[in-house]
Image (cartoon, coloured by chain):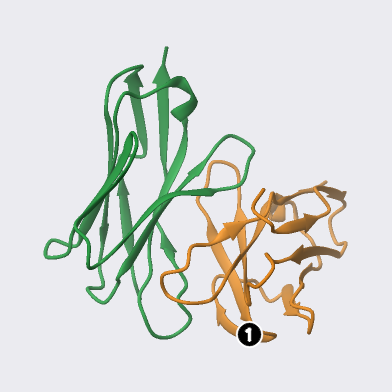
Chain colours: A green, B orange
């Protein structure tokens, strides 16, 4: 089955800095890659996603890049703010079967004011 | 608001007991997923249903069972509870296609004493 590795497990930045979270996946058949943000004690929420026919996608301060050849994708957050502090999960899904996303173990992002 | 409703929000029970967690998916979503999240842990996939049928099983214990009813709501039954079952249990729903994101409920926090 699919395996998703996520790094780093913890990321500490100063407000205004950029943050990058990286994920690798094992199955080249995976073609959908969502990112979820989970604030403390709350539910995971989709913040951005990318499909395998796209190399990059941006939404305001958030961007995701995908390298299908290397089988890795990354989340970039620019001009970080304290409210960006949360756990971020990447995931990968492949066609066929039950379409269950395989999640990374999460990155705890801490933005210091 | 994700549109996914989970009840109850909190549940405190004793070891050896049985509880039922309930989930109503987003309107129009046919697929329901159950996840377990222990303290500082990632999202552990338990089971998925699609339009009333079990579609995939993850790391679900034999003491746990679930079902999806004709109105598409789902219940997760946890029996012979142990201290280690204390966790946040999330239900998520999606349309069930490969590139459809999961929409998570607010979770049920289960405490076993």
Question: Mark 1, chain letter?
Answer: B
Image x and y of residue B18, in percent: 86, 65
Relative horizontal placement of residue A15, taking residue B16 as reference (left or right): left
The part of the image, by quadrant, that contains residue B26 is bottom right
Q: A80 above or below A20?
A: above
Q: Nearer the viewer, residue B104 or A41?
A: B104
Please give the name of the residue rendered at 80% of the width and 62% of the height, measured from the top-left corner. B21
Q: Nearer the viewer, residue B45 or B63?
A: B45
Single out the residue that lies furthest toward the top.
A113
Total labels: the figure holds 1
Image x and y of residue A6, in percent: 32, 49
Please give the name of the residue rendered at 56% of the width and 78% of the height, measured from the top-left corner. B57
Relative horizontal placement of residue A97, taking residue A13 as reference (left or right): right
Q: A9 above or below A92?
A: above
Image x and y of residue B81, in percent: 79, 61
Please give the name of the residue rendered at 42% of the width and 25% of the height, measured from the top-left corner. A110
The part of the image, by quadrant, that contains residue A40 is top right
Residue at label 1? Answer: B54
Q: Nearer the viewer, residue B72 or A58?
A: A58
Relative horizontal placement of residue A61, taking residue B9 as reference (left or right): left
Please give the name of the residue rendered at 26% of the width and 77% of the height, measured from the top-left corner. A29
Q: Nearer the viewer, residue A103 or A43?
A: A43
Q: B94 above or below B90?
A: below
Q: Secondary structure at mark 1?
A: strand
Image x and y of residue B79, in percent: 81, 68
């Amino acid at each position: 089955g699919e395996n998703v590795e996520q790094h780093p497990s913890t990321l500490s930045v100063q407000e205004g800095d950029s943050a990058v979270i990286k994920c690798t996946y094992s199955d080249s058949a995976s073609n959908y890659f969502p990112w979820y943000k989970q604030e403390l004690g709350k539910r995971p929420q989709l913040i951005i996603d990318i499909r395998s026919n796209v190399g990059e996608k941006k939404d305001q301060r958030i961007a995701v890049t995908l390298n299908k050849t290397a089988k890795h994708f990354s989340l970039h957050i620019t001009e970080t703010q304290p409210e960006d502090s949360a756990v971020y999960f990447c995931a990968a899904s492949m066609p066929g079967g039950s379409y269950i996303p395989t999640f990374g173990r999460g990155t705890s992002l801490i933005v210091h004011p | 608001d994700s549109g996914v409703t989970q009840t109850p929000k909190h549940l405190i029970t004793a070891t050896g007991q049985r509880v039922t967690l309930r989930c109503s998916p987003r309107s129009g979503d046919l697929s329901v997923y159950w996840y377990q999240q222990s303290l500082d842990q990632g999202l552990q996939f338990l089971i998925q249903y699609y339009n009333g049928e079990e579609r995939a099983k993850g790391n679900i214990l034999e003491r746990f069972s679930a079902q999806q009813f004709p109105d598409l709501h789902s219940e997760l039954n946890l029996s012979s509870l142990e201290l280690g079952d204390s966790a946040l249990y999330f239900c998520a729903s999606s349309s069930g296609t490969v590139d459809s994101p999961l929409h998570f409920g607010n979770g049920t926090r289960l405490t076993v004493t």
